[in-house]
Image (cartoon, rainbow, N blue to C red):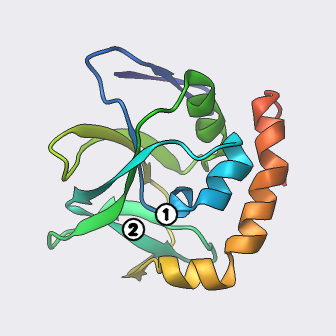
Amino acid sequence: MDILVSGNSRRLDRSPAGPKGLFCYGTLQFDDVLKGLLGRVPQRLPASAPGYRAAALEGRVYPGLVVQALGGSAAGVVLTDLSNEEWRILDAFEDDQYELRELSLSTGTMGLAYVWQGGDVRTEDWDAEEFQARHLSAYAERCGRIGPRLAAGEPKGE
């Protein structure tokens, strides 16, 4: 799969030989977030990204996937049946400090993941259970407001 970058957006040229799935290690693992953005929960498989971790980010409730210097592996899921329109929505949703990269996954396949390029990386890993308990409801509601705008080709806004 070739990744074409144009301005602030990342467009995917999906070739049959390229990765088929999106590796999700943070908020996109939650059904309510996916429903808010895409209107459905795509098929998924458990996976991990060896050599990476889902890092807590300063001042943010969502994580960033960063290289783990001492090994380790970021746990997550691979969304396996995204349409081109859903890829476009997720790409528009992701912060500009993420870069879409091809990664080797624990499944023995390649996948794409949004890898954090910005600063503010904390030493501790992101805590999915804490996010679920403290932030998921409000975050999913926000995604429910943003999803239809992104589907209509409008900016994310707030």
Q: Image height check: is 87 above or below 84?
A: below
Residue 112 drawn at (x, y percent): 37, 39
Residue 54 numbered tag: 2
Residue drawn at point x = 82 percent, y = 39 percent: 148
Residue 89 drawn at (x, y percent): 66, 35
Residue 40 drawn at (x, y percent): 65, 43
Of helix, strand and loop, which one carries label 1? loop
Q: Image height check: is 37 above or below 4?
A: below
Q: Earlier in the sequence, mark 2 or mark 1?
A: 1
Q: Is disc 1 surrounded by few (<14), some (14 to 19) or many (20+) residues within 10 Å?
A: many
Residue 26 numbered tag: 1
- Decide if residue 155 is in sight here: no
Of helix, strand and loop, which one carries label 2? strand
Q: Give residue 109's quadrant in the image.
A: top left
Q: Image height check: is 80 above or below 75?
A: above
- Which image quarter holds the N terminus? top left
- Which image quarter holds the C terminus? bottom right
Residue 59 drawn at (x, y percent): 63, 77
Q: Are marks 2 and 1 in contact (CB under 8 Å)?
A: yes
